[in-house]
Image (cartoon, rainbow, N blue to C red):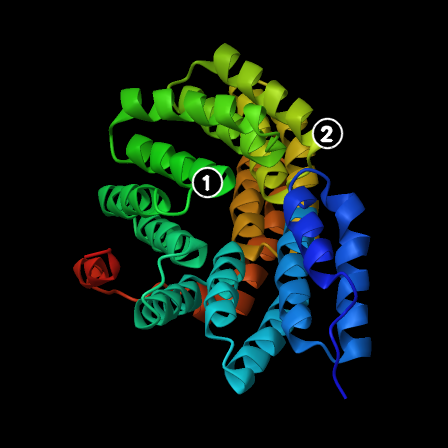
Amino acid sequence: MSATVPNAAERIADIARRMYRAPSEILLQAEALLADSHAYHDLHTQVHACLYLSIIRNQLGMRFDDCSLLLQALEICEANDYRLLSAQVLERLGRDRYTGGLYAESLAYWKQCIEVCRALRHCGHAHVQALIGLGHVCSAYNEHLQAVEFHRAALQLLKLHPDPLIHVRALLSLGWDLYNGGQSDEAVQILHDTIELSRQHNFGHYVSESLLHLGTIHLKARDLAQAELYFEECLESMQETPSHWAECNLMGMLAEIRFLQGSPEMARDIIERGIHLAQQDGMRHIEAKLNAQAAGYCAALNDSSGIEYYGRQLEHLHEENDQSWHIPAIDLSNIRQYLPG
């Protein structure tokens, strides 16, 4: 016999409000909500708990069982005709697969999410976030100006149901793809805007990510002093709101600065921290990139054993993930059918 978890709506709202600001604190509440949903056989609440646990665990670097939780949630939605909730789960599955470097799977989930939203004539937040996701897939294929189209479409659609968090997410993605598409001035301005908006709303993880991108832009321009300032500020921001994805990438960037400053040994030490985090979180594509960097630093140190070690690690990662990392040659012009009409 099923029943509704007491105060479920209030508990869900509290988790949604606080999960990005205090993920470590809110994790236990989300786990308790999931346990209660099982005890009461409250399937609707169970789906919400699975969604929020996926987001929180991803932020804290606890990704290994998220997909199974989400797949369970999707089964519940399909069996009980929770169509709006299924769109949210599909969007989250796309994000989980994207974080793991499984771009073909993420593409399929985000397309399916948009198809569900269109069938329901519902232009809610799952639809907006799936558009952002398709923009990220375009980025993975180096089609950055196509990605810009999706991010701008997401921002336009968001005007129907404004949400500061998703607005910042779309704006941040837009800024980064504008930069990679060769429109640096607008990109830098947008990234500064995302920092200001994120601080206003206490979205610490997006402050960190924006600073990481600004530092990267200056690093690529060989402005090492300014890049280092942004990266140090990013590191400070992550002390308040952890983001393992941002920290892994930050370690790679800080290591490169030390290398360019003539300290390959320090660079290798820093990159080890990033590799450890990437291993812990299952971010194999980032782990591979950092191992390649580490091998380069060992070459500069004439450390043949280090070159051999990191080379083996890199080879092993590619052997394990070759099929899932393969990005099939597709015509991305077809993806435009998923833009809002």
The CA span between labels 2 and 1 is 20 Å
Please tell me the numbered disc located at residue 338: none
Q: Quadrant of residue 220?
A: top left
Q: Residues within 10 Å of mark 1 (few under 14, many from 20)?
A: many
Q: Quadrant of residue 25?
A: top right
Please tell me the numbered disc located at residue 169: 1
SS under mark 1: helix
Percent of width and height locating residue 127? 38, 58
Q: Residue at x 31, y 73 (%)?
A: 119
Query: Which mark is in front, 2 or 1?
Result: 1
Q: Residues within 10 Å of mark 2 (few under 14, many from 20)?
A: few
Q: Earlier in the sequence, mark 2 or mark 1?
A: 1
* 52 with respect to 3 (left or right): left
Q: Can residue 305 be seen?
A: no
- The quarter of the picture where the C terminus appears is bottom left
Q: Amino acid at mark 2?
A: Gln
Q: Residue at x 54, y 48 (%)?
A: 286
Please tell me the numbered disc located at residue 239: 2
**Residue sticking out furthest to the top:** 225
**Picture layout, residue 242 above or below residue 130:** above
Q: Amino acid at mark 1?
A: Arg
Percent of width and height locating residue 113? 40, 67
Q: What is the total number of numbered labels drawn onto the structure image? A: 2
Q: Residue at x 32, y 30 (%)?
A: 179
Q: Can residue 255 be seen?
A: yes
Percent of width and height locating residue 50? 66, 66
